[in-house]
């Protein structure tokens, strides 16, 4: 049994220790991409998060599978919980070979933990290397922490990666190879896991944390998910593993 708030506290403590760490999170979208399924333009992924995917194998889908192979002690995998998607949870448990102690909630920073996440980012006293959608450039001064580097991600990340994977990797190497002991917060849809997989290969001294939509109120300057609304059913949801 993994208690929702206890897991949040455990991972935050690891992040705050400033030791090298990875947190990657996999949900419905990542699973569909790994299976070669379609993410249509009628889904939240496209209407809110600005990405879609055609039917069939994609470079991003293949890289997502590759990113599941880590067993290093620094790696924590977030997967769906039984109360949100038990089928996907069981599937991910079958795919992963990392110890169960290094597996946690994909929803770690959302639902009833969201308010604790926001309190944490507001309390950050260290600089952050931010990787997220290019639209955040207009809101960087509104974030509650200091951003020392910003790596913008284009819209339609699956298809953009299909044509520009090597360019993205070279830019990542150039910007991060000499960045040591820093906190990276990454919010780039299903590209996040692939970027973190690549970043770890470039430099293992940092903390690479996939924060997903939990920074959207700063990235986009607006509420994008029901869990962000106080007393909404999702804002009160205490997930169970």
Image (spheres, grey):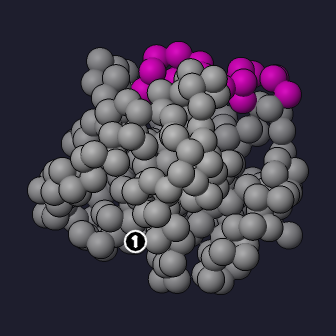
At x 13%, y 63%, the residue is: 178
Q: Nearer the viewer, residue 239 or 196?
A: 196
Q: Which residue carries the number 1 mark?
A: 19
Q: Residues within 10 Å of mark 1 (few under 14, many from 20)?
A: some
Residue 240 within the magenta-colored segment of the rendering: no
Magenta stretch: helix, strand or loop mostly:
loop
Secondary structure of the residue carrying numbered label 1: loop
Question: Residue at 59% across / 66% down in the picture?
Answer: 77
Quadrant placement of the C terminus: bottom right
Of residue 206 and residue 80, the one placed in the foreground of this image is 80
Residue 38 seen anywhere in this rendered image of the structure:
yes
Residue 224, magenta (yes or no) = yes
* Location of residue 121 in the rendering, given as x and y in whole percent from the top left corner: 48, 40
State left or right for residue 21 relative to residue 80.
left
Q: Say which quadrant the N terminus sits in.
A: bottom right
Please tell me how many numbered marks the rendered image carries.
1
| Residue 42 falls in image quadrant | top right
Residue at the (80%, 67%) spot, across then down: 90
* Front one among 227 and 69: 69
Locate residue 181, reporting x and y percent.
28, 65
Q: Residue at x 40, y 71 (%)?
A: 19
Q: Which residues are magenta?
A: 217-233
Location of residue 106 in the rendering, given as x and y in whole percent from the top left corner: 66, 54
Residue that sits furthest to the front in the current view: 56
Viewer-proximal residue among 213 and 37: 37
The reply to whether residue 192 is visible in this rendering is no
């Amino acid at each position: 049994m993994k208690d929702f708030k206890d897991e949040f506290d455990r991972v935050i403590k690891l992040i705050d220790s400033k030791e090298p760490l990875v947190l990657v999170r996999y949900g419905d979208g990542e699973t569909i991409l790994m299976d070669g399924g379609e993410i249509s333009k009628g889904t939240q992924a496209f209407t809110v998060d600005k990405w879609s995917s055609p039917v069939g194998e994609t470079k991003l889908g293949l890289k997502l599978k590759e990113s599941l192979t880590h067993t290093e002690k620094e790696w924590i995998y977030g997967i769906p919980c039984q109360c949100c998607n038990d089928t996907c949870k069981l599937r991910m448990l079958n795919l992963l070979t990392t110890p169960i102690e290094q597996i946690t909630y994909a929803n770690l920073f959302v639902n009833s933990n969201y308010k604790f996440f926001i309190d944490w980012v507001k309390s950050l006293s260290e600089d952050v290397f931010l990787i997220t959608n290019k639209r955040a450039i207009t809101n960087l001064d509104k974030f509650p922490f200091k951003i020392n580097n910003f790596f913008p991600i284009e819209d339609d990340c699956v298809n953009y990666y299909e044509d520009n994977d090597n360019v993205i990797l070279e830019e990542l190497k150039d910007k991060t190879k000499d960045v040591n002991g820093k906190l990276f917060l990454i919010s780039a849809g299903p590209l996040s896991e692939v970027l973190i997989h690549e970043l770890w290969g470039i430099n293992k001294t940092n903390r690479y944390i996939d924060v997903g939509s939990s920074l959207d109120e700063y990235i986009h300057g607006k509420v994008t998910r029901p869990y962000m609304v106080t007393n909404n059913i999702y804002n009160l949801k205490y997930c169970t593993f």
